Image: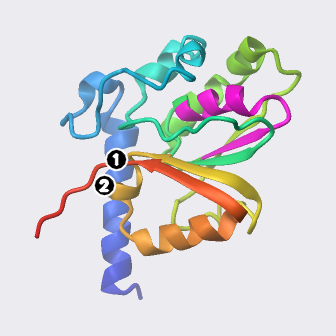
Amino acid sequence: MKSSDQLQNYSTLESVKEYYGKVLKSKADLKTSACCVGESLPSHLLPVLGEIHEEVLNRFYGCGSPIPYQLEACTVVDLGSGSGRDCYLLSKLVGSQGRVIGVDMTDEQLEVARKHLEYHRDRFGYNESNVSFVGGYIEDLEGAGIASESVDLVVSNCVMNLSPNKERAFREIFRVLKPGGELYFSDVFADRR
């Protein structure tokens, strides 16, 4: 039998999956603007943004830009990768020697992201795609096949707030990061005290 915490976590995850997988079809469907910021990105990302497929951009629901400079040949994990916008931006920045892994629990979002793998591989001039998308939960990256100390950078864009078990999610992040690896995330926060 599941504990009440497990049942609450399951209920929260199912609600999030329903909203991001079945309700939302574009940015216009968002019920709030809390997670949305203007379209401005750091200058190092603007040229790449123009190369991202339109459907991927239309299905992007992030709240900022947790993507740093100088990522050539890095291995990056994007938590809650959705339609893949940040993964494809990262793909260009890490180059053909780097690797990007998008993790999302929503089949519908993963379908959109995977549909455009070849488009971006061709657009960026790579012999093979350096991006993969896996189904999984940010609280269980091991279950998503991400090994300990295997990642240079973890990014997350407006997803940590949706986790019903943030402590476990952060433990998993630090488990997969290599020594000296970094976490960049952008999110919404409310202090109700």
Q: Which residues are magenta?
A: 86-102
As rendered, which of 190 and 80 lies closer to the eye?
A: 190
As rendered, which of 66 and 10 lies closer to the eye?
A: 66
* Place of residue 135 in the rendered image (x, y in percent of width and height, measured from the top left): 60, 51
Residue drawn where x is 51% and y is 32% of the image: 83
As rendered, which of 101 and 92 lies closer to the eye?
A: 92
Give yes or no for residue 117 being in the magenta stretch. Answer: no
Do callouts 2 and 1 mark residues in contact (Cβ within 8 Å)?
yes
Q: Which quadrant holds the C terminus? A: bottom left
Residue drawn where x is 69% and y is 29% of the image: 93
* Residue 105 visible somewhere in the drawing: no
Residue drawn where x is 28% and y is 39% of the image: 35
Horizontally, residue 32 falls left or right of residue 127, namely left
* Residue 120 visible somewhere in the drawing: yes
- Say above or below: 152 vs 55: below
Q: Which quadrant holds the N terminus? A: bottom left
Q: CA distance from mark 2 to mark 1?
A: 5 Å
Horizontally, residue 57 falls left or right of residue 113, namely left
Spot the residue most to the left. Answer: 193
What residue is pinned by disc 2?
15
The disc at residue 18 is 1
Q: Determine which quarter of the picture holds residue 178.
A: bottom right
